[in-house]
Image: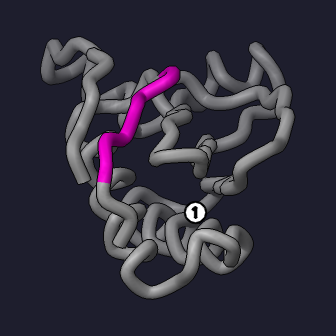
Amino acid sequence: MLEGKAVMVETDILQTMQQKALDLTSKVLDLFDVTEATEIGRFIKKEFDRTYGPGWQCIVGADFGSFVTHCHGCFIYFCVGNLAVLMFRGAAGPEAEAKQPCAAALEAIQAGSSYSLHHFVL
């Protein structure tokens, strides 16, 4: 396991989903070396697909760039040490997003939840 703080860079998912992502990252770092970014990403993606429905994408590494379109309420980007984790559920564009928002966004609206950014200890 990689000990240290996870630094949340950007997110719009529910607090419970944020914690799930951090917990999964902690768990997978017990199973794989930090150099096995593809395996780490595969593990986290499959668990999010299983828990929150299919369509999640997960990018893991120490050096990458990205520009993605995602469903509202379905984006998280955080770092643990020098390892960055980007997860999102894709959207075809603003029109598709408006028609089918992420289930997490709907839950937040119904529950009156707010999104927040936090630092977590793994």
- Residue 8 is situated, as x and y percent measured from the top left of the image, at 42, 28
Residue 78 shown left or right of residue 83 in the figure:
left
- Residue 117 is situated, as x and y percent measured from the top left of the image, at 31, 19
Identity of the amino acid at label 1?
Pro
Tag 1, which secondary structure? Answer: loop
Q: Is residue 10 above or below residue 15?
A: above
The N terminus lies in quadrant: bottom left
Residue under label 1, please give it: 54
**Residue beneath the point at 77% across and 16% down:** 95
Residue 70 shown left or right of residue 81 in the figure:
right
Q: Is residue 51 magenta?
A: no
- Residue 122 is situated, as x and y percent measured from the top left of the image, at 25, 54
Q: Is residue 45 above or below residue 95?
A: below
- Residue 106 is situated, as x and y percent measured from the top left of the image, at 35, 27
- Circle 1 crowding by C-alpha within 10 Å: few under 14, some 14–19, many from 20: few
Q: Is residue 6 magenta?
A: yes
Q: Main secondary structure of the magenta part?
A: strand
**Residue beneath the point at 51% across and 40% down:** 79
Q: Is residue 73 above or below residue 112?
A: below
**Residue beneath the point at 31% across and 49% down:** 4
Residue 75 appears in which quarter of the rendering? top right
**Residue beneath the point at 21% across and 45% down:** 121
Residue range in magenta is 4-10
Residue situated in front as seen by the camera: 93 or 61: 61
Residue 48 shown left or right of residue 46 in the figure:
left
